[in-house]
Image (cartoon, rainbow, N blue to C red):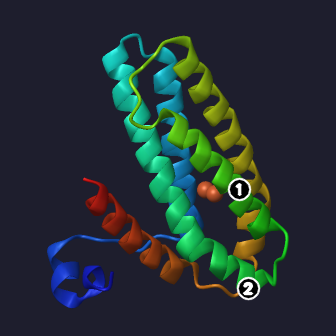
Amino acid sequence: MTTLFNKTTKSATPYKSQDATTLLRADHKLVSGLFEDYEKASTKAMKKKLVRKICMELSVHAQVEEEIFYPAVKQALKDNELVPEATVEHATLKSLIAQVDGFEPDGEMLDAKIKVLQEYVKHHVKEEQDEMFPKAKATKLDMLELGDMMTARKLELIADRS
Ligand SMILES: [Fe+2]
Ligand SMILES: [Fe+2]
């Protein structure tokens, strides 16, 4: 996790620190675009590829939030509502992901599950972006440091999955 930030790696890989919520918003936007691509996809192969990508992106994103962002926000806000609720929503997301990840496209049922997942993600993202992120940004949390930690963890998780 720290190797990304030692001097040798840093000079070898151009890397710019990003604010934690900027990173998370970028993930949200990416996934929303993938859902739109799924709606337009016309072949089983295209759908299969998109489902795999959606599941990967959502799983990694949720894990990084749960391991790094949510605990930091919970502590900084002394929160006992937003983070627990978001964590419960992640559990529902994971169960929906488990119903589509790795399955062969099977027509209308897969389309229905992806649609439900899309709507659920939309609801969850809206709560994060409209409520949690503004409150988190108003605290003394170092958003750039959190962003660096999240980027490093995300790269690790993606490497583990490929
Ligand atoms: Fe989340
Ligand atoms: Fe999120």
Give the residue at mark 1: 129
User: Residue 53 bears which disc, if any?
Assistant: none
User: Which residue occupies 59% across, 65% down?
Assistant: 21
Label 2 Cα crowd, 10 Å radius (few <14 / some 14-19 / many 20+): some
The x, y position of residue 114, in whole percent, is: 57, 28
Observer-nearest residue: 85 or 96? Answer: 96
User: Which residue occupies 30% across, 71% down?
Assistant: 15
The x, y position of residue 69, in whole percent, is: 59, 73
Q: Could you give the CA–CA distance between mark 2 and mark 1, rounded to whole angstroms?
A: 17 Å
Label 1 Cα crowd, 10 Å radius (few <14 / some 14-19 / many 20+): some
User: Which residue occupies 34% across, 21% down?
Assistant: 46
The quarter of the picture showing ligand 1: bottom right
The x, y position of residue 146, in whole percent, is: 52, 79
Callout count:
2
Which residue is at the far right?
81
What amino acid type should be assigned to the residue bearing mark 1?
Gln
Observer-nearest residue: 7 or 67? Answer: 67
The x, y position of residue 31, in whole percent, is: 51, 41
| Between discs 2 and 1, the one toward the N terminus | 2
| 35 left or right of 14 in image | right
* Mark 2 sits near ligand 1, with its Cβ under 8 Å away: no
| 11 left or right of 153 in image | left
Give the residue at mark 2: 76
User: Which residue occupies 69% across, 88% down?
Assistant: 140
- Quadrant of the frame with the N terminus: bottom left
Observer-nearest residue: 71 or 5? Answer: 71
Residues at circles 2 and 1 in contact by the CB criterion of under 8 Å: no
What amino acid type should be assigned to the residue bearing mark 2?
Ala
Regarding mark 2 in the picture, which secondary structure is present there? helix
Query: In the image, is residue 23 above or below residue 103?
Result: below
